[in-house]
Image: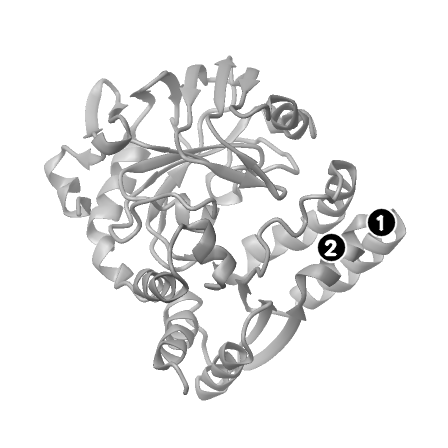
């Protein structure tokens, strides 16, 4: 029996997220996603007068390619994929996973090699296409979220089909405030961090780049970050699980990094990937009212109601502080009372306390 929510999601992606226009090309990449979703996207693309292009991926096959990746192989792959991407007006990726740890035994040097060659493709897609990236609700994701498959599917469609337009007035007010702000201070459990966002644009994300969505992001002035931050949301990066990440910054650089559960060595190996990995490329405030708990899936976790994320690695072109890295690792802190509380201060004014915005112009973003 066909699930009508699949058609609704295809409509949301094509008509709202990438706002596909007549005559435009869209590249649709499906990673272990049911064929019904691909069919719905193709049909909706044609209904809007666009031209669909499809790439199908399988996680186990991708892992096999990655395990013994060579410079020659990925240099050629990058050139071919970049040529394809340059012909696209829009890009949609739906990434399912039967096993969220499928690539956990791919070595760091192979990941680094592949990211080096794929960076031009990613950069062109981010800077020159209308794009949206999302997950697919496989049972592995439901298990990771400690939910039944049916309950997780209901949650997934509720959050992806949310009316993101309703967030825009408050998000635009937050953007305006961030654009006027110099000094930021983050306070919480084992957290007291200061930095500047002066003259770095704030960007509203309301369902155009990711589903789910619901954040406004900027970046710290590269050498301005000082203090300590402890992230209370679990995370996963390169297939490895991390908890209790604690970072100490001095003049923008992470000078000490620890993780709970004996993962400090692995954490530092990632942060030593290149010179930019120990500097921060993004600061974002999140406010999705449907997402409350972390599930080790960053496209969901970085949007958690009452959270922010702080990102070692690559800065986005739209909010650029000059940091360059193969790493872009969104580390999430939840500041609601059930997670220990916390505050965000802009130029010595508290703008959010315990996950709730305190300024009148921002209160529409509170759930």
Residue 14 at x, y percent in the picture: 43, 74
Estimate how packed mark 1 is, as few (under 14), some (14 to 19) or many (20 or more) residues with alpha carbons within 10 Å.
few
Callouts 1 and 2 close, C-beta under 8 Å: no
User: Dot 1: what SS?
Assistant: loop
The residue at the point 58 percent across, 40 percent down is 237
Query: Could you tell me if residue 132 is visible in this image?
Result: no
Residue pointed to by mark 1: 68
**Relative to 352, is 184 above or below?**
above
The furthest residue to the left: 360
Q: Nearer the viewer, residue 361 or 192?
A: 192
Q: Nearer the viewer, residue 330 or 218?
A: 330
The residue at the point 50 percent across, 15 percent down is 249
Q: Nearer the viewer, residue 243 or 299?
A: 243
Query: On the image, which quarter does residue 346 sit in?
Result: top left
The image's mark for residue 149 is none
The residue at the point 63 percent across, 42 percent down is 238
**Relative to 295, is 327 above or below?**
above
Residue 311 at x, y percent in the picture: 49, 33
Q: Label 1, label 2: how many angstroms apart (C-alpha)?
A: 9 Å
Residue pointed to by mark 2: 63
User: Dot 2: what SS?
Assistant: helix
Estimate how packed mark 2 is, as few (under 14), some (14 to 19) or many (20 or more) residues with alpha carbons within 10 Å.
some
Query: On the image, which quarter does residue 28 sit in?
Result: bottom right
First of labels 1, 2 by sequence position? 2
The residue at the point 37 percent across, 67 percent down is 150
Lateral position of residue 235 relative to residue 101, left or right: left
């Amino acid at each position: 029996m066909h699930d009508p929510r699949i058609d609704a999601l295809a409509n949301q992606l094509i008509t709202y997220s990438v706002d596909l226009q007549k005559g435009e090309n869209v590249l649709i990449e499906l990673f272990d996603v049911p064929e019904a979703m691909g069919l719905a996207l193709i049909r909706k693309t044609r209904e809007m007068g666009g031209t669909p292009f499809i790439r199908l991926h399988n996680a186990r096959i991708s892992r096999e390619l990655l395990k013994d990746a060579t410079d020659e192989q990925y240099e050629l792959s990058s050139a071919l994929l970049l040529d394809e991407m340059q012909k696209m007006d829009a890009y949609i990726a739906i990434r399912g996973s039967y096993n969220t740890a499928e690539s956990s035994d791919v070595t760091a040097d192979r990941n680094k090699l592949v990211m080096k060659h794929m960076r031009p493709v990613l950069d062109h897609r981010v800077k020159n296409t209308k794009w949206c990236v999302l997950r697919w609700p496989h049972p592995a994701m439901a298990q990771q979220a400690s939910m039944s498959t049916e309950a997780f599917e209901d949650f997934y469609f509720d959050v992806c089909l949310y009316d993101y337009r309703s967030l825009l007035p408050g998000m635009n007010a937050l953007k305006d405030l961030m654009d006027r702000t110099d000094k930021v201070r983050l306070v919480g459990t084992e957290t007291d961090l200061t930095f500047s966002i002066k003259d770095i644009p704030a960007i509203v994300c309301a369902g155009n780049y990711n589903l789910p969505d619901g954040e406004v992001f900027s970046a710290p002035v590269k050498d301005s970050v000082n203090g300590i931050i402890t992230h209370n949301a679990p995370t996963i990066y390169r297939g490895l699980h991390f908890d209790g990440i604690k970072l100490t910054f001095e003049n923008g650089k992470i000078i000490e990094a620890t993780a709970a559960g004996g993962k400090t060595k692995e954490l530092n190996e990632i942060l030593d990937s290149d010179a930019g990995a120990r500097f921060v490329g993004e600061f974002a405030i999140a406010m999705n009212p449907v997402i409350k708990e972390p599930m080790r899936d960053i496209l969901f976790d970085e949007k958690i109601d009452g959270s922010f994320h702080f990102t070692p690695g690559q800065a986005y072109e739209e909010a650029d502080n000059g940091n360059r890295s193969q790493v872009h690792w969104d580390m999430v802190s939840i500041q609601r009372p059930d997670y220990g509380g916390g505050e965000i201060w802009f130029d010595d004014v508290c703008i959010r306390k315990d996950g709730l915005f305190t300024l009148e112009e921002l209160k529409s973003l509170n759930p």
